[in-house]
Amino acid sequence: MDPVALTRALVDIDSTTGRESEAGRWLVEYLRGLGFSVTTQPVDDHRFNVLATLGTPRVVFSTHFDCVPPFFSSRVDGDRLYGRGSCDAKGILAAQIAAADLFRREGETRVGLLFVVGEERGSDGAKTANALASGCQFLIDGEPTESRLGLATRGMLRLKLRASGRAAHSCFPELGESAIDKLLDALVDLRSIELPDDPLLGRTHYTVGLIAGGVAPNVVSPAAEAEVMFRTVSDGAEIRRALRPLESRVQIEHLLEAAPVRMTTVPGFDAVVFPYTTDIPFLSAWGQPLLFGPGSIHVAHTADEFMSISELHSAVTSYGTIARHLLARLA
């Protein structure tokens, strides 16, 4: 099996989040053609997860096949395979299929494949997929880790800060109440709030990713809001408690949370902490998690997203090595 050709075939299908159905159908047919038993799991009216097995899987390779926009097709230049999803995560998916197919050829029926939708926007595929787990003991999740295993990943907490005010003509600001001023004051106060830290994962940090408010330049703003993304090292409840002083200025709405995760490793690989989150917190029923994948997160989501072809080939061997270690633990 050529993982480069497989990656290109997948990259050339637009599966930006919300548009995964064509890629899902392609995967179903391809995996059935290899001899896997394939189950699809609806996530909404159009999208579905894909589970490929040979028996009862005890070790499962998993990743997502949605991508961030905009879509652009594949091309090869030297050792680099460019295209949307080449790094995050269709090259990874191809390497996992190639590794699982080697086990299939050997008659090993305890290795399966789980491919999910929606990772890039809320992990709705992973949340749904948790119901499919049955007897699996190890989940090898694929994200671009530069071919290193994950010791741990940070969690994520998204909150929306809403401020309410009273509109007035800007000539008479004393007749109004500026929601934008309240929101800005709250965001300034946030800078001085002590956030949780952890000896392994470090200190919680955050980004104000979205901000909006007001109706016109000459109107005192009646409403304003900001979305804040925290990269967490502890339970999100600790952060929400720390933010209580802000509630005198703004309302705080909980949007999404993924817990930090500590993971299993195997010998022979570098293992590090990664600052991002993955689908792993939503796949807890699939057994002990591992995190590994070729490619760098620094090129994922960029206009020049690429996967090293040599690293892609090496990943097939690495996935096989990791799975063999885990299967040996089951013997």
Image: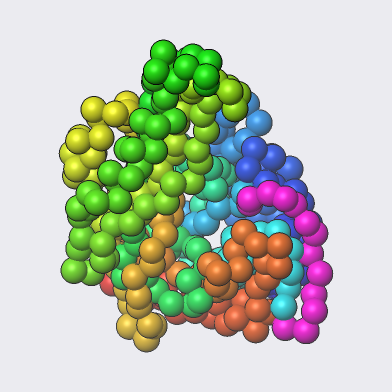
288 within the magenta span: no
- The residue range painted magenta reads 67-79
- Residue at image location 35% in from the left, 78% down from the top: 271
Picture quarter with the N terminus: bottom right
129 or 326, which is in the foreground? 129
Q: Compared to 81, does 47 lie above or below?
A: above
**Residue lying furthest front:** 171
Rendered location of residue 246, percent (x, y)? 25, 35
- Horizontal side of 331 relative to 279 (left or right) equals left
Q: How is the image coloured?
A: rainbow
Taking the spot 63% from the left edge, 51% from the top edge, the residue there is 67
Quadrant in which residue 323 is drawn: bottom left
Find residue 269 and report its horizontal and vertical position in percent.
Answer: 39, 83
Q: Can residue 277 be spotted in the picture? A: yes
Location of residue 184 with respect to 176 vertically, above or below: below
Q: Main secondary structure of the magenta part?
A: loop
Residue 318 placement (x, y as % from top left) = 49, 79
- The residue shown at (20%, 35%) is 244
Numbered circles on residues, count? 0
Q: Residue at x 20, y 60 (%)?
A: 197
Q: Nearer the viewer, residue 313 or 207?
A: 207
Pinpoint residue 328: horizontal percent, then vertical percent.
Answer: 33, 75
Residue 68 in magenta stretch: yes
Quarter of the picture containing the C terminus is bottom left
Work out whether residue 282 can be spotted: no
Seen in the image, is 330 located left or right of residue 93?
left
In the drawing, does residue 324 fall left or right of residue 78? Answer: left
